[in-house]
Image (tube, rainbow, N blue to C red):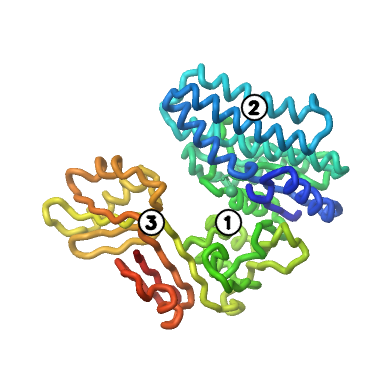
């Protein structure tokens, strides 16, 4: 079995979905399990809907839902002839349900509501793509990840139950129709023991591909992207980027963790554990070589890589009564960050201060301040940047940070990181 993953950008409109169809036609003779994300920016839009739902803003809730509905219907209309066919009915039913949601009581746990609503983006995209490739003559079966990937109840960032998921997935594939060679399923979503939908964290579809690969002992995973593979820097900000043609799992996980947004950092571990190679390839130029992630470090093709995370918030926490930031204080601070689901991009401490860097758009400063007080005081700098240089030297450091004010820096043998403004 091969596993393919197509992200939101690779299915952003009807033309892109046709391109996915072409790629799948070329692999018609293989056994392929295809994981897809929601179309384009649908997940963001559904998050917006959820906020309106939670704030009981009926007008904006319906208005935003309508725009997501129209967007999907336009794509379906460009892909299918029959205006009353089952894909139209499927999409219309999803939005009927969503509209009705406004009149139903809401769970106290907003993350639960998030998962029930936002998971539908992937449900719709996978169904559209499945029906579309069937029309191309591909023997495709639609798989519902809400029956196959079993998770705990940590809504919005659910943890996979590997044994149960493996059992469910293998049973499903064994019982599937003999002549199916393409399976299409959703990224990002799973389900609890009771059958409620869960999500695996934003951008989690790559991780889903790795879960299916692990559970089916796949021979390889390909993530199809709008870039030629993993590059040593983001082409949005850098001119002369280089393709990393072959890198180790270790290098890939470090780059992803530091913020190279090409693959989700959780993707690598399941693949490394089973020795499954990961290819990152361009859906625009599918024959091009791309990146192969496999092997151990000695095969690494070491060139400096640059990762820039913009819009960071540098938060400095100190104790209100001049006590040390010791293990006990750190444990309490981490507990607050964990509860508020704040991800730390970098941290550093001194006797009296603990500094952390988080994504500026993911933090609700007010609730952080409430949670930290009265024990801790807190100061922060907005709009700073985090620059990471993997395999740095003095020249690359000068290139990245000269003429900038360095607020904080850290270096290990392989990696230099700077918080600058
Ligand atoms: N659709 C989800 C998101 O945008 C998952 C993914 O694309 O990987 O976060
Ligand atoms: Mg995405």
User: For residue 296, what is the image quadrant?
Assistant: bottom right
Q: Which tag is nearer the camera, tag 3 or tag 2?
A: 3
Which residue is disc 2 drawn over?
A: 94
- In this view, the residue in front, 221 or 359, is 359
Tell me what residue is drawn at x 44 percent, y 27 percent: 54
User: For residue 299, what is the image quadrant?
Assistant: bottom right
Query: Counting other residues with Cα less than 10 Å from the Cα at mark 2, is it few (<14), some (14-19), or many (20 or more)?
Result: some
Q: Relative to 166, does residue 270 appear above or below in the rendering?
A: below
Pick whichever of labels 3 and 2 is earlier in the sequence.
2
Pick whichever of labels 1 and 2 is earlier in the sequence.
2
Tell me what residue is drawn at x 61 percent, y 22 percent: 97
CA gap, disc 3 and disc 1 = 24 Å
267 horizontally vs 216: left or right: left
Residues tagged 3 and 1 counted as in contact (Cβ below 8 A): no
Element type at marker 3? Answer: strand
Query: Counting other residues with Cα less than 10 Å from the Cα at mark 1, is it few (<14), some (14-19), or many (20 or more)?
Result: many
Label ID, residue 267 = 1
How far from the left and from the top, in percent, is residue 125? 68, 39
Q: Residue furthest left?
A: 321
Q: Residue furthest top?
A: 103
Pick whichever of labels 3 and 1 is earlier in the sequence.
1
Label ID, residue 312 = 3
57 horizontally vs 11: left or right: left
How far from the left and from the top, in percent, is residue 78? 77, 37
- In this view, the residue in front, 273 or 314, is 314
Tell me what residue is drawn at x 76 percent, y 54 percent: 1
């Amino acid at each position: 079995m091969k596993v393919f993953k197509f992200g939101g950008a690779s299915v952003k409109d009807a033309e892109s979905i046709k391109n996915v169809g072409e790629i799948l036609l070329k692999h018609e003779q293989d056994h392929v399990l295809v994981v897809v994300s929601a179309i384009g920016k649908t997940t963001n839009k559904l998050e917006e809907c959820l906020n309106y739902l939670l704030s009981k803003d009926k007008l904006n809730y319906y208005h935003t839902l309508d725009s997501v509905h129209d967007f999907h219907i336009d794509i379906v209309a460009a892909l299918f002839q029959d205006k009353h066919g089952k894909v139209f009915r499927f999409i219309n039913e999803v939005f009927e349900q969503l509209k009705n949601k406004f009149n139903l009581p809401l769970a106290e746990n907003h993350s639960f509501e998030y998962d029930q609503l936002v998971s539908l983006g992937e449900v719709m995209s996978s169904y559209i793509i499945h029906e579309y490739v069937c029309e191309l003559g591909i023997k495709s079966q639609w798989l519902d990840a809400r029956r196959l990937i079993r998770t705990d109840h940590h809504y919005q960032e659910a943890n996979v139950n590997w044994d149960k998921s493996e059992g469910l997935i293998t049973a499903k594939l064994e019982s599937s129709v003999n002549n199916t060679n393409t399976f299409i399923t959703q990224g990002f979503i799973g389900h609890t023991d009771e059958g409620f939908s869960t999500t695996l964290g934003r951008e989690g579809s790559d991780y889903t591909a790795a879960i299916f690969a692990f559970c089916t002992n796949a021979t390889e995973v390909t993530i199809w992207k709008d870039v030629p593979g993993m590059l040593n820097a983001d082409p949005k900000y850098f001119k002369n980027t280089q393709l990393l043609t072959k890198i180790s799992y270790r290098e890939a996980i470090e780059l992803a963790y530091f913020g190279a947004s090409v693959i989700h950092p959780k993707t690598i571990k399941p693949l490394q554990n089973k020795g499954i190679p990961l290819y990152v390839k361009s859906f625009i130029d599918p024959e091009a070589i791309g990146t192969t992630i496999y092997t151990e470090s000695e095969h690494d093709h070491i060139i400096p890589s640059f990762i820039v995370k913009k819009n960071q918030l540098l938060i400095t926490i100190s104790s209100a009564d001049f006590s040390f930031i010791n293990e006990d204080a750190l444990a309490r601070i981490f507990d607050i960050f964990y509860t508020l689901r704040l991800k730390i991009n970098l941290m550093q401490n001194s006797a009296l201060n603990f500094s952390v860097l988080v994504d500026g758009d993911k933090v609700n400063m007010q609730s952080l301040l409430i949670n930290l007080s009265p024990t801790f005081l807190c100061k922060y700098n907005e709009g700073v940047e985090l620059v990471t240089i993997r395999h740095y030297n003095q020249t690359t450091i000068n290139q990245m940070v000269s003429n900038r004010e360095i607020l904080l820096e850290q270096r290990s043998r392989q990696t230099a990181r700077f918080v600058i403004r």
